[in-house]
Amino acid sequence: QVQLQESGPGLVKPSETLSLTCAVSGYSISSGYYWGWIRQPPGKGLEWIGSIYHSGSTYYNPSLKSRVTISVDTSKNQFSLKLSSVTAADTAVYYCARHLVGAAHFDYWGQGTLVTVSS
Amino acid sequence: QSVLTQPPSASGTPGQRVTISCSGSSSNIGSNTVNWYQQLPGTAPKLLIYSNNQRPSGVPDRFSGSKSGTSASLAISGLQSEDEADYYCAAWDDSLNGDVVFGGGTKLTVL
């Protein structure tokens, strides 16, 4: 069974960089699929942040692209998100998920982690 | 403002059939498959329908999806109280570099 687990600080100060990691078990990242990050501000809808392939190929949401870096570590079977210059608007539950390239077909999701941006 | 447009709310009584619409454009729904997600309160979204009308294993056949042109619909028949949740449509968008777009979500209330 494929499982994803997000980890990282739950509180980040404004203007700093948010860093999260998604550990994957039950499936090798190197075997295929894209691995993505999606966020959900409190009481609001889902927003795709970006995705990465095991080769390092990435797709980013154009509205966040200037602040986002997604990387992959196949040796640890995990991938990571960095979002720079955060503001209160970046407060959200952050999910990691697996999907097919060229499709918004996210079949396995992490449980999500709440990140609050506040001083 | 979401790229895909959904009604913010929908409702029905137990046993009824309800539909939720999702409207997009030629660069997303018009040229790619549509997926639907169910999100129960306090939980991660769950894939409900993929490739327009396919159900993952374990999803009851009360849930069905369809697509026509640049719009899609999710239908729930035999509505049950446990269907009360938020529903999101999503599709790949071919504009620019390619990205994932979501609808704003529809809150389904079972009366």
Image (cartoon, coloured by chain):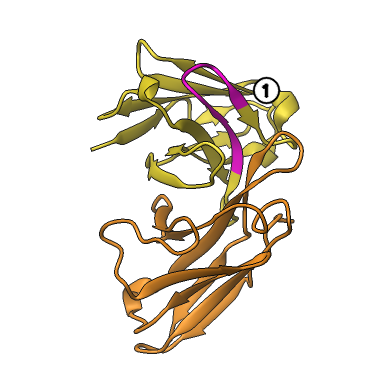
Chain colours: A yellow, B orange
Q: Specify start and end residues of the magenta stretch as a single range.
A: A48-58
Dividing the picture into quadrants, the one containing residue A18 is top right
Tell me if residue B72 comes above or below residue A59 in the rendering: below
Indicate the position of residue B88 as horizontal and vertical percent values: 53, 60
Q: Is residue A88 above or below residue A46?
A: above
Q: Position of residue A14 (x, y in %)?
A: 68, 27
Residue A69, percent from left and from top: 62, 21
Q: Quadrant of the N terminus of chain B?
A: bottom right
Please check the rendered image and state whether residue A54 is part of the magenta-colored stretch, yes or no.
yes
Is B99 displayed left or right of B62 in the figure? right
Q: Amino acid at mark 1?
A: Ser
**Quarter holding residue A32:** top left
Location of mark 1 (residue): A84
Residue A67: percent from left, percent from top: 71, 25
Q: Quadrant of the C terminus of chain B?
A: bottom left
B23 w.r.t. A117: above or below: below
The reply to whether residue B65 is visible in this rendering is yes
Q: Nearer the viewer, residue B74 or A71?
A: B74
How many numbered dots are placed on residues in this image? 1
Quadrant of the rendered structure where residue B33 is?
bottom right
Q: Secondary structure at mark 1?
A: loop
Q: Is residue A119 visible in the rendered structure shown here?
A: no
**Residue at 29%, 69% in the rendered image:** B60
